[in-house]
């Protein structure tokens, strides 16, 4: 056994625990402190540019534009012509699809008959979206969705009205004829 204060036999002979020497600093690299790069290719970094003054970093205002609006111009520019989608056109198309599916399945299940009442809304929303898209030429690119939803709304409104009138006529015919289903 070793005496207190002496290293054990299993520790390598070069090992010295930190703190045994007053000059040991565990936070300094063994090779020494980092030096400033030097040589012929090294030059001092240039000073930062002076701060810009003025609220308009994007350029002067466009004709018809207030000076304060030029400072809020988006960095990426304006949207490409026809790249925006009108929300009413999508809504009209969805309502038209729901009304077509409801009319087609109404012969199998009468629960879908209320879905046919989506058709007039598809007609109205589609016509309104078409007018708004045509009022802003080049802004929106989904006029076909508005027109398709509007026409599905027109056709299914007419077919739904014929279906409801036929159902009412059938009920009236059965009621007046005295024929009973029971």
Image (cartoon, helix red, strand yellow):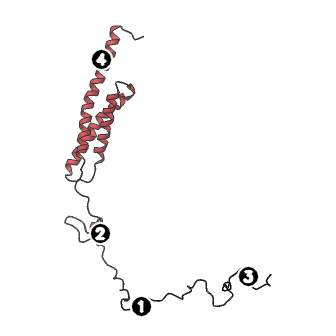
- Tell me which residue sits at (27%, 71%) in the image: 58
**Residue that numbered label 4 is attached to:** 169
Ranked by sequence position, the earlier of labels 3 and 2 is 3
Task: Give the residue drawn at x 63%, y 88%.
Answer: 24
In the picture, residue 62 is in which quadrant? Answer: bottom left
Number of other residues with Cα within 10 Å of mark 1, as a class: few under 14, some 14 to 19, many 20 or more: few
Residue, x 27% and y 35% (percent of image)?
A: 153
The spot of residue 53 in percent (x, y) is: 31, 78
* Dot 2 crowding, Cα within 10 Å, few <14, some 14–19, many 20+: some
Q: Earlier in the sequence, mark 2 or mark 4?
A: 2
Whole-Å distance between the Cαs marked 3 and 2? 75 Å
- Nearest to N terminus: mark 2 or mark 1: 1
Badge 1 marks a residue whose secondary structure is loop
- Counting residues from the start of the chain, the first of labels 1 and 4 encountered is 1
44 vs 72, nearest the viewer: 44
Secondary structure at badge 2 equals loop
Label 4 environment density (alpha carbons within 10 Å; few <14, some 14–19, many ≥20): few
Q: CA distance from mark 3 to mark 4?
A: 109 Å
Picture coordinates of residue 92 (x, y %)? 29, 40
Q: In terms of secondary structure, where does tag 4 sit? A: helix
Q: Determine which residue is flagged by label 1.
A: 38
Q: Residue at x 23, y 46 (%)?
A: 143
Q: CA distance from mark 3 to mark 1?
A: 46 Å
In-image side of 130 versus 35 (left or right): left
The Cα atoms of the two marked residues, 1 and 4, are separated by 100 Å
Viewer-proximal residue among 25 and 39: 39
**Label of residue 71 in the image:** 2
Q: Which of the marked residues, 3 or 1, is nearer the chain's N terminus?
A: 3
Label 3: how many Cα within 10 Å (few below 14, some 14–19, many 20+): few
Q: Which of pointers 2 and 1 indicates the residue nearer the eye?
A: 1
């Amino acid at each position: 056994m070793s005496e207190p204060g002496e290293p054990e036999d299993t520790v390598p002979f070069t090992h010295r625990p930190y703190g045994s020497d007053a000059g040991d600093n565990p936070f300094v690299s063994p090779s020494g402190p980092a030096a400033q790069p030097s040589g012929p290719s090294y030059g001092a970094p240039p000073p930062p540019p002076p701060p810009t003054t003025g609220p308009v970093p994007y350029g002067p205002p466009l004709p018809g534009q207030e000076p304060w609006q030029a400072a809020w111009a988006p960095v990426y520019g304006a949207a490409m012509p026809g790249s925006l989608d009108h929300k009413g056109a999508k809504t009209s198309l969805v309502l038209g699809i729901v009304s077509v599916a409801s009319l087609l399945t109404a012969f199998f299940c009468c629960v879908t008959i209320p879905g046919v009442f989506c058709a007039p809304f598809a007609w109205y929303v589609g016509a309104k979206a078409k007018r708004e898209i045509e009022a802003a030429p080049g802004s929106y690119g989904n006029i076909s969705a508005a027109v398709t939803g509007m026409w599905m709304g027109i056709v299914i409104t007419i077919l739904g009205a014929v279906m409801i009138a036929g159902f009412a006529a059938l009920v009236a015919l059965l009621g007046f004829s005295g024929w009973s289903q029971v």
